[in-house]
Image (cartoon, rainbow, N blue to C red):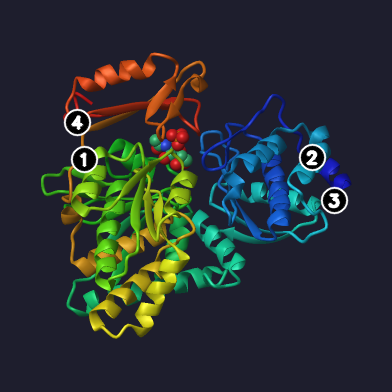
Amino acid sequence: MDFEGLKKYSALHPKPAGLTLQYGTAGFRSEAQQLDHIMFRMGMLAVLRSRVTGATIGVMVTASHNPEEDNGVKLVDPLGEMLHPSWEEYATHLANAEDQELQKIVTEICQKAAVNQQKDASVFIGRDTRPSSKELSQAVIDGISVLGGQYHDYGLVTTPQLHYMVCCQNTQGQYGKPTLEGYYQKLSRAFTELIKKSLSSGEAQRQLKIDCANGIGALKLAEMENYFPKEVRIQIYNDGTKEKLNHLCGADFVKVHQKPPKGLDMKPNESCCSFDGDADRIVYYYQDMAGHFHLIDGDKIATLISIFLKELLAKVGQTLKMAVVQTAYANGSSTRYLEETVQVPVHCVKTGVKHLHHKAQEFDVGVYFEANGHGTVLFSKAAESTIRQLAKEEKDGAKREAAVVLENMIDLINQTVGDAISDMLVIEAILAMKGLTLQQWDALYADFPSRLLKVQVADRQVIDTTDAERRAVTPPGLQEKIDALVKKYKLSRAFVRPSGTEDVVRVYAEADTQVRA
Ligand SMILES: CC(=O)N[C@H]1[C@@H](OP(=O)(O)O)O[C@H](CO)[C@@H](O)[C@@H]1O
């Protein structure tokens, strides 16, 4: 290890005094403007992790020197262990260490995690379009270099594209080719196969207006458009050439404000969707003839996909276990509809994609989405090979056809993480195959009125929760008060939990009317 290099780098980028960082649900977030040292240390951490696992690790930079922008660095670990307690601890330790302690901390981590310091290490790097991303990803490269790791810099990519690359690399190409072209080809081939029939049967052109939050999604969609069948027409809005990232647009803005993003002129019944800044989330929406805005969120996306997959699984006649995974923020109406009407088991886990992803891995087919539009579908290895075999060899025509559709769905879905581009193509394919409009999809069920607020408190950690964060165990008496209030109203539900990403407590309530919520 090049500790001389480490010292030189630390002298150039001193850790800001008094800064401590917390490892959140998605990686590091910080209000700090001076992020270089965090990125540098994440580069080091990725090398150490790669040496333990022998696998390629990804570092996605979605951070900015501008304190008004959301900051993050996402670590892509094929085993997901980077987000597990011991590595969370190493990460926090490394990020918060004073410069002069770095060498000691690295040595300590190496001992505890049994890192073989001579082993090769490989790290993939990506970044989104935030102006300081380039400089910050150079800090990651410097961190990798002082520990003697190898890296490949993919430059501008979406977060899910970097996950895809890491997965391809670690499966020796089984998941696909670890290039952008490989990603575009894999997804567009499956998509074209799926919608081929509905297009040739006289279906009008598919049109979709896409708000890219002034982020990386715009660049990558524009690249991918050349691979789409010509019947599919997309119009990209908020491509980042005029405005700043997320400025009055993007999936979060649309969901929170329940209105269309700036710059997207929406005509009645037109299909529209919004990505978030690094293109790992998506929500759909439309305006009805009376001018009312209708949001189709992650819960409804999960519902559409579940109905479609359940039908196909029944057709192929295999006893594959499917389940949906949600968080406490999923609208109660969606949970009820999935359980009672679609008749699929629903599981509730703690907030944060890592929890959803891990739970979904327990099933043959695990559909997971957060209400905010982040989600995907996971197929177990066994389910995937059964489906691929049926698609190839099944004698019964109807069964084989269903297996072929499932096989293409497996290829179209980015199983590594929620992916706005992939999710959008999955949704467009399902709507085309089922001949559904957005209005029909939206009408599957009506959301219960709800309210989500955040409250600043002196110390949010005084609230401890249980039951997938739906019940507070401390401070004493809080849950009893919530229970007493909830009892007064029909169809009501409420909970409080400390945020994992902001210094706030979130309060959520649902009831039979908006006023009561
Ligand atoms: C209610 C809500 O939207 N929570 C968000 C938010 O988590 P909190 O722990 O609630 O701050 O940020 C997470 C990471 O982006 C995202 O996964 C999650 O859905």
Q: In the rendered structure, are the residues bearing label 2 and label 4 in contact, judged by CB atoms less than 8 Å apart?
A: no
Q: Which mark is residue 491?
A: 4
The amino acid type found where label 4 is placed reads Leu
Of marks 3 and 4, which one's residue comes earlier in the chain?
3
Q: In the rendered structure, are the residues bearing label 3 and label 1 in contact, judged by CB atoms less than 8 Å apart?
A: no
According to the picture, the residue beneath numbered tag 3 turns out to be: 1
Of marks 2 and 1, which one's residue comes earlier in the chain?
2
Q: CA distance from mark 4 to mark 1?
A: 12 Å
Rendering coords of residue 186 (x, y %): 45, 72
Residue drawn at 43 percent across, 56 percent down: 419
User: Outermost residue toward the left?
Assistant: 290
User: Outermost residue toward the right?
Assistant: 4
The amino acid type found where label 3 is placed reads Met
Looking at the image, residue 245 sits to the left or right of residue 172; the answer is: left
According to the picture, the residue beneath numbered tag 1 turns out to be: 447
Q: Ligand 1 within 8 A of label 4's CB?
A: no
Q: CA distance from mark 3 to mark 4?
A: 60 Å
The amino acid type found where label 2 is placed reads Glu
Of marks 2 and 4, which one's residue comes earlier in the chain?
2
Work out which quarter of the rendered image holds the C terminus and state it: top left
Q: Nearer the viewer, mark 4 or mark 1?
A: 4
The amino acid type found where label 1 is placed reads Asp
Q: CA distance from mark 2 to mark 1?
A: 51 Å
Looking at the image, residue 181 sits to the left or right of residue 329; the answer is: right
Rendering coords of residue 104 (x, y %): 83, 37
Label 1 SS = loop
Q: Can you see residue 244?
A: no
Looking at the image, residue 511 sits to the left or right of residue 103; the answer is: left
According to the picture, the residue beneath numbered tag 2 turns out to be: 108
Q: Nearer the viewer, mark 2 or mark 3?
A: 2
